[in-house]
Structure formats: structure tokens, C-alpha cells
Image (tube, helix red, strand yellow):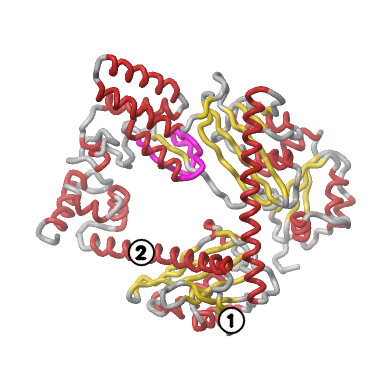
Amino acid sequence: MLDNDKTTNFNIADELKKLPRKPGVYLMKDKSGKIIYVGKAVNLSNRVRSYFMGGEKPARISRMVSQVRSFEYIAANDEREAFIIECNLIKSHMPHYNILLKDDKTYPYIRVSTADEYPALGITRKYADDGARYFGPYPERVSAKKAMGLLQTIFPVRTCRKKSMGKDTRPCLNYYIKRCPGPCAGLCTKEEYMVSVTGLLGFLDGRAPEIIDELKKKMDDASRDLRYEQAAVYRDSINTLRKASDIYMIKPGMKRSDVAACAAGDGLAVVYILNIENSAVTGHLQFEFDSSAETDEGLILRDFMRQYYSGRNMIPDEIIACNEIENIDWLAEWISANKGQKVSIKVPARGEKKKLADMAGENARHVLSAYSERKNTDRSNLVDLASLLELEVLPERIEAFDISSLSGRDTVGSMVVFEGGKAEKSRYRRFSVKQEAQGDDLKAMAEVVGRRIARINDGRFGAPPDLIMIDGGRNQVNAARAVLAGAGYDIPICGMVKDDRHATRALIYEGREYPLMKQAALFRFVASMQNEAHRFAIEFNRKKRKKRYFDSELDNIPGIGEKRKESLMKHFGSLREIRAAGISQLESAKGISGALAAEIYAYFHGRNGQ
């Protein structure tokens, strides 16, 4: 054991003898004392002991047990009580081996800031208790953005972040394309504005059928009165609303519900959810994850629900499950406690809800098939790469590095991560290169790799890499290898070489070049890593250049410090918008007085500059 082992005095064999033969919850801990698994048992003694006995176990359980250095337990009065305790402990600690959804992916919501005097429309991935109304989640950001754009054509509502209205001398572009009534420039009354907000909220609350019926009546009336242009406007509005809602009608009177189904096989699992609002399917979500430790679809769905509904946000009134779930009443009781009101969970045997459950199940199986095919391709790429380079260990985690600069300035580094052959964007990292390495790619690469290796045991960076990929040839690889050797690490390092047209051509490993053109799948995989590392570095470099330009411009204006620069950028979004703003618009930014607004305007338009 390592010196920092917090469980040196814990003897597993002795502690197993002390376990009671009654229901309870057990907590497995690693060498640092961190909880890595929480489980429930009818008989604590038998259940915990089974982990440390011989016999074949699933790979995931074997990996977990190999890391266990100690355990704790909480005895319960009965199995139901143990279930509730287990749920709450998983929710609090999120242990690694309980968590199925490893990619911490969050889906976007449409947000209406109803706490503001003039509510604004926006998209966010963070659900907060801030007085705003949230709708969703949507499967992808593009879906939320498309829905928001369509809704603005019917219910024009602002999307800006301005705090005060009526002070601007002119409105933004959204006013001219009829997506905002221009409250910032006093071009509408509050009552007129709130008519759009009320209609928008009504639509997002699921009252689309009522709104569409009302528009149909108006269209028919306009047509009957020979007002054909107005009738055409209503017709277009109806079509737009139908696109925005994407409605699939269900039996009227159905509660706000989620229909959930799980499909599992070959160590993979998918949970597919249909969202029901006011008797209509308003969206769907799908979650993909590894499930090598469990094959029972009902158990997987139960464990998924304990994570997905662990907070109060977006819990429906009813959950319809496609799979049979063990202890379904206890699960419903626990979710109800999280929501603060009763939530029912049903596995329907017939009727409309059974059709919905079957629909979700069929979709889950389709998604699982596609996911399995994609995972097999990812796995095949890793096997091909390991075979080509004759690696001793399959590179489950690959980190790729690149350097970007322009004319020797604003040099930055990027680290992108591929786990199991798939990009893990939450693990990406960016590095601002120090002054002494500016303009020198080899020194910059050595610095960036060195800074990563210095954080090799930092959980925020994830597990150590099985393979390091460098965007460059022998010199860049040698610079990185020297850093690794100096730190005492022996991690394989491979260079990704480009041709004269800057396209991926070959790999450099252990001084030897490996052409890729004859292996199409592997070529695409390596190129995707190289391109991703390059893209991430370029984006950071551009951001640095933009900030430097922005800072240098505003630094020339007396009275502008860091806080006011930040306030201006937050209010206007770009230096270009600040240049174009009038004095009254500049004054509307937080911390900018009338005199300072005049000074800023004069700098860009008067005596000091253009």
C-alpha cells in the first residue's frame, strides 16, 4: 500500500466476521478512503462476504473489488428502509461504480426569465432555482435553438441580457426581423410585451392544441371575411407552431409523464425516455452507457431512475416503465420525497399507456443496436492501433496534444481525451504557455505535457493516459518523451505526422514511421484525434488574441479598469458592439457613468481614435 493509504489498519478478513446478518447498506472504499460503491443487502454478512470469495465475477465488479481497501455498513430495520438509505447515499456521494452515466452529459432547457420585468428567452444547460421558468430538456442544443427561433416568430420576446429597458436609442437586429418588439428602445408597452410572453409560456406549458385551435378559428374568420392576407398569416403561424411542438397526440387527460424503457446486451445499455405534456409527446431523450456488471434491464432501469430523478428538477407526475422493476413501490416513494408530492410508477399491461411503453421499448432497442455497432467500431480502432504499434496495453484512454500560436504570440496548448475510442469533451484541457516558451513549439510542447504529467494523480484530469499522441514529428515526440522520463513515467508516446497539404499521413513511434493510408478506418480515427486537438488549440488561441486586442483597446481609455472592461463585455458581447454603441447605450452598462460613457464614445468616434 502507498504511504497516503488511509486504511492501513483495516483488515478486511477480520471485519467480515463482524458483519451482522440483517438488512442494511454497505459502502466500499478505496485506498484514499473515498466511497467507490454503495449497495443494499437483505443480509449484510452474506452479501459483503460474497465480493471477496472466489469464483468468476463480471469485469466491472472485479475491477471494483481490486480497489477496495475498507468498507463500512449501516444496519437497517428492514429491506425497504435499506433501499431508501441506499438511494440517498448514492445521491450524496455519486460513487464511481454506481454511476452508469459517466459522461456527465446535460441536456439543454429553454429558459424564460419570468422574474424580470421584461422576461427574456434563452437556452441553458443548468437548471437553477432562480425564479425563471424552465422547459425541456431537449435532446440536443440545436433542437432547443430551432424551437426557440420558431417560437420567436409567433411570440416575439427578447433574448438579450439587458437589465434596463427603454434607454437604448435604437433596437437590435431582432426587432427588424420581427423576433422582438424592441422594449430596450421603448418601442412597445409592457402590456404589449407581456401578451407575447403569456402566449409563449402557454405554448411551452403544453397548451399548443388550444392555441392552434384558436388560430384556426381566426384563420377561418379572416378567410370568410375575404381577408386572405391575414388568413395566410394565421396559416403560417399554425404551421410554425406545429413544427415547434412536434406533437404526437395521446389520449386526452393524461398527466405530465415520462415513459422509460431500457434495452441491454453485450455489456451495453440504453435508456430511452418519452416526455408527455398535456396528452402530447413533446420530446425524447436517450442515454447510452456501459453495463458489464448488470444484464437485468429492470434493475438497470431502476438504478438509472435513482440517478435521473435524484433532484427535484423536472420530475413528472407519473412514470410509465416498459420493464418490470423490483421494489417499484419503494422507488416511487423515494422519488415522491424528492419531488415533494406523490409520483406514481406503473408498468402497464394493456391500453394506451402499454402502447407508449412498447414504443419506448422499441426505440431503446433500435438505439442499442446503433450504439453497439458504434462501440464495436471504436473498439476495433483501438485494437488496430495497438496492433500497429505493438503496444502491450490496449489504449483505453488516449490524450492528444497540440500547440497553436500566431507569429510567435499567444502560444497555447490543447489536450483532448479519447476514452474507449470516443471523444470525452468534459476531460479536455487548455494551457496558456508561459512567456519563456512563447514562439518555440518544442519548448511549448514540453511545458504542456509536463504540466499535464504533474497532475497525473489529479482526479479532475481523470485517469492517467495509456497512450499520448503528439501533433508533430520526431522532434515534438522527443521533447515530450524527455519530460516523461524526467518525471519517472513510462507512457507510450506517438507522433501524428501530416503531409504537405496538412492532412494526416503517418504515425511516429519509437523512432519508426507507420503509414496510415492503407488502413482507412484507423486513418479516420487518428485524423479525428489530430483534428480535434488542432481545433481545440486554435479556438483557444483565437480567444486569447481577441482578449488581448480587446484589452489593449480599452486600456487606452482613462477610467477603464478590469471590472469596467468585464462589465462592458458582459453587456455588449464584443468590442465591435461597444464601438457601435451610443453614449446612452454605453451608460446603460453597469458601472459606466455618463462622463465615462462620453469618454468611451469620444475615443472611438472623436478626438482619440476611430
Where, by quadrant of the figure, is residue 110 drawn? top left
Q: Earlier in the sequence, mark 1 or mark 2?
A: 1
Look at the image and say whether residue 173 sits in the magenta stretch.
Answer: no
Where, by quadrant of the figure, is residue 124 drawn? top left
The disc label shown at residue 486, or none: 1
- In percent of width and height, residue 442 lies at 46, 80
Question: Callout 2, which amino acid?
Answer: Arg
- In percent of width and height, residue 37 lies at 72, 50
Q: Main secondary structure of the magenta part?
A: loop
Between residues 11 and 280, which one lies in front from this camera angle? 280
Q: Is residue 269 visible?
A: yes
Q: Nearer the viewer, mark 1 or mark 2?
A: 2
Image: magenta residue range: 120-141
What residue is drawn where x is 28% and y is 46%? 590
- In percent of width and height, residue 351 lies at 66, 22
Residue tagged 2: 542
Q: Secondary structure at mark 2?
A: helix
Q: Is residue 26 above or below residue 493?
A: above
Where, by quadrant of the figure, is residue 317 drawn? top right
What residue is drawn where x is 45% and y is 69%? 413
Number of marks? 2
Question: Callout 1, which amino acid?
Answer: Gly
What residue is drawn where x is 42% and y is 34%? 244
Question: Could you give the CA–CA distance between mark 1 and mark 2, rounded to whole angstroms?
Answer: 32 Å
Horizontal side of residue 443 vs 181, given as left or right: right
Between residues 521 and 494, which one lies in front from this camera angle? 521
Q: Quadrant of the N terminus?
A: bottom right
